[in-house]
Image (tube, rainbow, N blue to C red):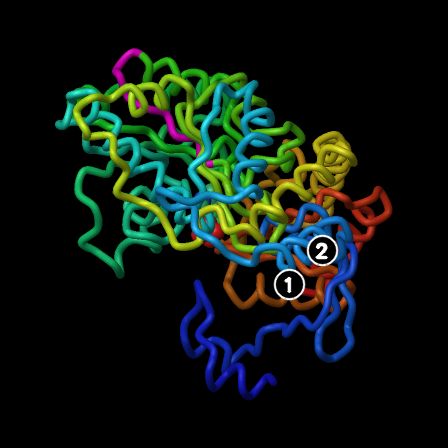
Amino acid sequence: LKEHNARSVWHPMAHPADSQANPPTIVASGDGVRITDIDGHQAIDAVGGLWNVNLGFSCQPVKDAIAAQLNELPYYSIFRGTSHPAAIQLAEELRDFFAPDGLTRAFFTSGGSDSVETALRLARQYHKVKGAPSRTKFLSLKKGYHGTHFGGASVNGNANFRTQYEPLMPGCHHIPVPYTYRNPFDETDPEKLAQKCLAALADEIAFQGAETIAAFIMEPVLGAGGVIVPHASFMPGVRALCDKNGILLIADEVITAFGRTGSWTGSRHWGVQPDMACTAKAITNGYFPFGAVMIAEGVAEVFEQDKTGKAAIGHGYTYSGHPVGAAAALACLAETKRLNLPENAAARGAQMYQGLLALKDRFDVIGDVRGGQGLMSALELVSDRATKAPIDKSRIGAVQEATYRSGTMIRVSGPNIILSPPLIVTEDDVSRILSDLATGLAAA
Ligand code: PMP
């Protein structure tokens, strides 16, 4: 399998030749929070799939719901004149779930990038329907990650994900992110930094002209950019600037919705109601590719009350609202609620964060510890604490390998180690993750 993998599989976010030099771990099975590779080695998956397997790998109610739906109706589309019970029931459940966020309509997609693309397109259309066709630009954060379609890539803050694919969508501008460890203002106080970033956003809006901007998109807690938790004043400040300037606020909740931050949604944690929220990942826990964009009442009304015909939606996917995905999502939502997973995410996230801070006291290679907001944490590794020079790629790879050998799978993203285990982890699981990580750091 390893040879065949190297010969025929191209891996996302990797050099095509990487898998020849460093054969990836080939995972054969999963059970609870643990995976087993083809060599029989078992590890806790502290990555939680890819921030998505909140319920672990063997959630029986989800498997049963998928099997039942496969027997009942494996596929039908929800385009125009057709629908099916699973999609309708899920939309109703999501309406209740997102009611505190003010989001009442669901537009189904097949994953996170599709959800971002959908939200960007609906934002432009919303302004056209309202008679403001000049509002076409998008603003986002410099370390934000919004998937890999051309729209999402254009608003991505990390230039590595943009430059090879340029020219991208014109009119996308990125503003400084409230990231205390490295920021253009050299500001380490989180609240002051948030205010400076908000001032930069206000300047950018004025520079571009508010009447040209469709939407601002942000993750309530930034994930792939290295788990950046903005100060509590930041997202409400963004909401206020958007309101003042007629700009839609899109929350990219692909990672944060359904409990990961210790709150049911990331926006709710900050007390913000966005105009749209992109979801995917944990909506089906990785058991089926699926996503949904949740839409606010005020935005929905503009579309639904349109008499000009401009609100006809020319966008959607063959697999929008896939019945098996919808059935999986219904079961995942029910299990997440039954187990009250946000509460466990908050408690275990606090344990993880304290443990990582303790590791920082032991290992000079740790420059920054981030997280503390549910089960999303990161360590930023440096070769020199004083200069904050980034760690060498091979050294962080060695930490990952040694940690895996000890019994925990971690994710490496640039200079960061990212930890986002399933939300069902126990206190013992988190202790084990921390001790394996310590072993990995010591060995490397
Ligand atoms: N938005 C965010 C915040 C994400 O983290 C991701 C994926 N990591 C995406 C969008 C894209 O989702 P997908 O990979 O399912 O297309």
- Residues rendered magenta in the picture: 244-252
* Alpha carbon distance from label 1 to label 2: 31 Å
Q: Secondary structure at mark 2?
A: helix
Neighbor class of circle 1 (other Cα within 10 Å; few <14, some 14-19, many 20+) is: many
Please give the label number shown on residue 63. Answer: 2
Give the residue furthest to the front. 81
Picture coordinates of residue 35, whole percent (x, y): 73, 64
Which residue shows up at 46% across the image and 43% down it? 83
* Residue at the image point whose x is 33% and y is 29% from the top: 216
Residue 400, compared with residue 259, is above or below; it is below
Q: Residue at x 53, y 81 (%)?
A: 5
Q: Say few, some or many: other residues with alpha carbon within 10 Å of mark 2 (under 14 / 14 to 19 / 20 or more).
A: some
Q: Residue at x 66, y 55 (%)?
A: 66
Q: Is ligand 1 less than 8 Å from the beta carbon at label 2?
A: no
User: Looking at the image, can residue 423 be seen?
Assistant: yes
Amino acid at dot 1:
Gln
In this view, the mark in front (1 or 2): 2
Q: Which mark is residue 202?
A: none
Task: Provide the residue designation for mark 1.
Answer: 400
Q: Residue 386 location in percent, x, y?
A: 52, 43
Q: Any magenta on residue 228? A: no
Q: Is residue 248 magenta?
A: yes
